[in-house]
Image (spheres, rainbow, N blue to C red):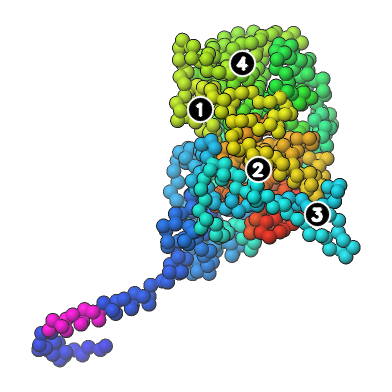
Amino acid sequence: MTVFRGPPGRPSALVSWWRRRPPLGFAAKVSIAIALGLSFVITWTTLSPTSSSQQISTERTYFAADIADPPPTSRNATSTSGGHRKKPSPRGHRKRHAPARSHRPNATPSPDAAASKANRTEPDSMPEQESNEKEREPASEWETEPGEEQEQEQEPEFAVPEENVESNGKAPKEEEDGKAPELELGDDSTELDGDEDDFAETTKNKDSKKKKKLPPLFSSTAHYHWKLCSAKSGHHYTPCVDFDGDGSQRHHERSCPRSPVTCLVSLPKEYKVPAPWPERKEKIWYGNVGHPRLSSYVKDNSWLNRTGEHLVFPAEESEFKGGAKHYVETIDEMVPDIDWGKNIRIALDIGCKSAGFGVALLEKDVITLSLGLTNDQTDLAQVALERGIPATIGSLGSRRLPFPSGAFDVIHCSECNIPWHSNGGKLLLEMNRILRPGGYFIISSRHGDLESEEGISASMTAVCWNTIAYSSDDASELGIKIFQRPASNEEYDLRAKKDPPFCKEAQNKATAWYIPIKHCLHKAPAGIEERGSDWPEEWPKRLETFPDWLGDLQTRVAADHSHWKAVVEKSYLDGLGINWTNIRNVLDMKAVYGGFAAALSSEKVWVMNVVPVHAPDTLPVIYERGLIGVYHDWCEPFSTYPRSYDLLHADHLFSRLKNRCKEPVTILVEMDRILRPGGWAIIREKLEILDPLEAILKSLHWEIVMIFRKDKEGIMSVKKTTWRP
């Protein structure tokens, strides 16, 4: 509308008319108000975004936003009626957001994948220690986290093949027309489905079973450009142990990089595949594990023999003078009731050297986990793993070790120089937590170390450990003391001085992931329904004996045992193309009751069972069966050296972690780090996750040996190559 104005100083005709118009009546005013209101509504409806576009503008497509528990169903703007968000439109995001800086400099996705993360915003970060304590503390024993993913109920267990197999147990042969017969997936969903959720007796919402959107990093359209890690430690890089990537320095506590590790660890020059077991027990390739610290250590210890390209471990020589076999026989004479291989099945050897103690006990059917200390510059855990001996790395500091309470039958420490009596005896209190009631603590030291012995004896008295044997062995030149933890609380109650005090009931002895050690004493289990109140059955009966304290879970553990026994015998040993003669170190990345490890107990392998910290705490069941394992959060790197394992087993691991980890592709990067070249991985997953995983593994140049799909599930057998970018 154009307004005409008159000469300056004179009102225009329109203004004059407005001044002369009669006042409006009440009805006219009401009509004008209604008209203005309707105009406002029409204008707002036309210009405001629709519900779908509004949803797109508030949708989060990056993993950092999905670390927290899933949003409640009351958030209608970003969720469906079942509590799951709709899949956003990538095009809508590109219109509304500017590209953000990549937080993954070493693994770069394609532009399509990058665009789907364009609205990424980082929340205010809390202090690292506080964040670790809150995020990583697992649920209490036998419970699940409230925000745990609801899809586990839909995960059917299956085997390839379980039916349609020949009588010899081998995979079906191809027919004359060249078409392979269809493999059958054993549907065990009625028996084993939802084990972990039922284990906690949680109630599931039926409406929440709708399909969730796939995170962008699991998109089959993403492409990755890999780079080598620039860490100074090179092919020995262990992210949560090395200090700023410098292999010459170690963290005193586990401390992982703030940014997820997406680079690939380099390989040693002319890396060579370890010899089959048991040859590798006596001889390994020095180039696979060689580093400056090891080189100087070999020169100072005659029992480590470097012969050409090999590091040789003669059976009659070890860190114990007179040999490890003689050392173990001395302990037998001191405590005849120890009964290796029957009464004693699981041992922890602290301060790993050549793992001679564990090697000697292998002949007695005892599985010994060697603990290499991260603050010890001469630990040889990497050498032990290369030899095929169970080992892990950790620290004895202010936090608990990643083991359940009452796990080990024996704890051994020879010349480990650990101040057990310092700081109020906190480290000894941690040993009291992880040692089984009635279990043995064996410590040996050089003659003349009286000050240490006196301090240790006082600390042992404070926790009521009884000295049951002492010997001075001339051959090994060691003084050996054997203590025993009380099997009941009677001796604790008779203490004149209640220091350390008993732990409060709220101080759960079961949780261990990033949990600080408290200056308190955990009581022994009292009731027959409590785990640890009775010693397990003799080995190997304990493997298939399910104690009464499991209650209704006995049926589930038995079903899990039968299930994996059938899968391993009918599929894994012959049907996946795996050469088991070169398999010794096996890692089950998401163990439940240890059924997979139990099924392999007759093979010449050992299995490290990993119970994720966000899953129900089933690790005590695994130890009760005579198997070993650790707690771990797969959103972080694993506590082991590169190229530690010959085979990785991941059963529906990614479907449990895709909405938990900030960048779940780093799990594959970690698998690439800890698996040796020529090693194998068995991955069982939903097809919506398995197919993108196949594309990522191909980008890593892993060989897809076998892949089988049925309905919405699949299994993949892959082999790592020597490719490096």
Query: Does residue 346 appear left or right of residue 22 in this picture?
Result: right
Give, as a single range, the part of the protein colored magenta: 25-36
Marks 4 and 3 in Cβ contact (< 8 Å) = no
Query: Does residue 526 appear left or right of residue 606 in this picture?
Result: left
Mark 1 → mark 3, Cα distance in angstroms: 53 Å
Task: Name the residue located 42 percent from the left edge and 62 percent from the top edge.
Answer: 77
Mark 2 → mark 4, Cα distance in angstroms: 33 Å
- Camera-near label (4 vs 3) is 3
Q: Measured from the top left, where is residue 326 in percent x and y?
A: 78, 15
Task: Name the residue located 13 percent from the left edge and 81 percent from the top edge.
Answer: 26
Helix, strand or loop at mark 2: loop
Q: Measured from the top left, where is residue 231 in percent x and y?
A: 63, 42
Give the residue pinned by disc 4.
484
Which label sits on residue 517?
1
Instruction: Say what amino acid the circle numbered 2 marks.
Output: Met
Q: How many marks?
A: 4
Marks 1 and 4 in Cβ contact (< 8 Å) = no
Q: Is residue 226 magenta?
A: no
Which label sits on residue 164?
3
Marks 1 and 2 in Cβ contact (< 8 Å) = no
